[in-house]
Amino acid sequence: MNKDSLILFLEINNLNYIFFVGKNDEENNFQIIFKQEVPLAGIEDDKISSLEKVFSTIKQNLYLIEQKLEHTFNEIVLILDNFNLTFLNLTGYKKLNGSQVLRENIIYILNTLKSRVVETDKKKNILHIFNSKFYLDKKKIENLPIGLFGDFYSHELSFVLINKNDYSNLENVLDKCGLQIKKILVKSFISGALTSNNNKNLDTFFYLKINENNSKLFYYENNCIKSEQNFKFGADIVIKDISKITYLNFDTIKMILKQMEFKENIKEDELIDKFFFRKIDYRKIKKKLIYDIALARIEEMLKIILFKNINYINYNKMSKNIFFEIDDRVTNNFLEKIFKMEISNKNSFKVNIIKNTSYDRMLQTAYEIVHFGWKKEAIPIIHPKISLTKRFFEAIFG
């Protein structure tokens, strides 16, 4: 094994630090050769609260990884899934008056918009910049229109920003561990890119992820992450409601939901099986009661997240595709089908259920973004094997 080709990844999410080491095999297939999950420490409310706890957790696990693989790492790719991020979409313009779109025109727009972001929000660092849309004389163009004649050119960029202090704290901790940040990737960007690749390069859709105690909705348009919103509630509030009314504990309810068959017309006389009352006194609890409680709470959740969310009303006009995923810890066919039914019925969405997303595929996508750049990223880190367009953007931004 060529140890020089090993790449160290660290995902930070709401529950865990997940360390990965991956490599490309001889057929250029990415493989995870090491994975380690440890409980989150030193991060609260999406911010580092204890540098010492974060440092000791990363340093200790880095030591174990390096001992096991007999290899010293000096670079790391960070995947962030729980930091407060800002998503910003800006458009630049250039009057052409019948002349060609030149390289210099695009350089000017890109530098102007980037400078505007840097100067107006000095407390933010740029993580990603995407070429979102190109318009020539109000007509949408798929690719950079260099050389085309027109009267008016507009170029929309989508920015993903992180709080500068959060970035500095992460950089400081990793520097103490002897690691330099090679690239920071936003998890929803990777998920969007992977979903697009898995669905015939579908380039515009919503993605809703319901976890145990939080939820996330992001919007992906023209192969760019345009917006992301996090919510401090998840599937646990459905289970809490059922528990309050039925006086059953969480574990029992999870077992019931996993085995309960989904159907809209549950008969009034259908009862929860006695099997679930082995350790407690049996009570007659109607299946329809469980269904009605779950349906009412899920309706409320989706109103807040999707249907009456003012941040996404305009995006609803752009796409009716939505990918939906429930975290493995709480997933079951019963809840999954209620969510799917409600999303489909209320807003005519085409719902695509995501199941068992492979970390190998996720890391393969992350590796490709880091190593080769992304087709819509304006300032990718580039490998020598790159397209003319990507060389162009590297030349602009260095």
Image: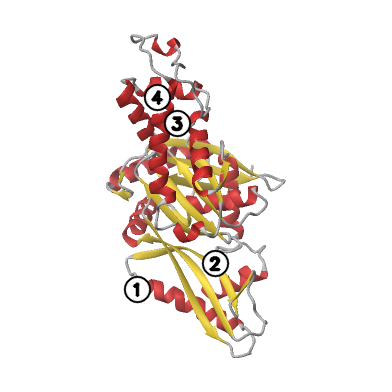
Read off the residue under disc 1: 120
Residue type pointed to by label 1: Thr
Along the polypeptide, which appears first: circle 1 or circle 4? 1
Along the polypeptide, which appears first: circle 4 or circle 3? 4
Along the polypeptide, which appears first: circle 3 or circle 2? 2
What is the distance, in whole Å, between disc 1 and disc 2 at their CAs? Answer: 21 Å
Q: Residue furthest right?
A: 27
10 Å crowding of disc 4: few (<14), some (14-19), many (20+): some
Along the polypeptide, which appears first: circle 1 or circle 2? 1
Helix, strand or loop status at disc 1 = helix
Of badges 1 and 4, the one in the foreground is: 4
What is the distance, in whole Å, between disc 2 and disc 4 at their CAs? Answer: 47 Å
What is the distance, in whole Å, between disc 4 and disc 3 at their CAs? Answer: 20 Å
> Residue 117 sits in which quadrant?
bottom left
Residue type pointed to by label 4: Leu
Q: Is residue 76 left or right of residue 321?
A: left
Q: Which mark is residue 132?
A: 2
Helix, strand or loop status at disc 4 = helix
Along the polypeptide, which appears first: circle 2 or circle 4? 2
For the point 61% across and 52% down, the residue is: 196
What is the distance, in whole Å, between disc 1 and disc 4 at their CAs? Answer: 53 Å
Read off the residue under disc 3: 330
Read off the residue under disc 4: 289
Give coordinates of residue 193: x percent, y percent: 58, 53
Q: Quadrant of the image for the N terminus? A: top right
Tags 4 and 3 touching, CB below 8 Å: no
Q: How is the image coloured?
A: secondary structure
The foreground one among 168 and 12 is 12
Give coordinates of residue 161: x percent, y percent: 41, 62
Tags 2 and 4 touching, CB below 8 Å: no
The foreground one among 175 and 106 is 106
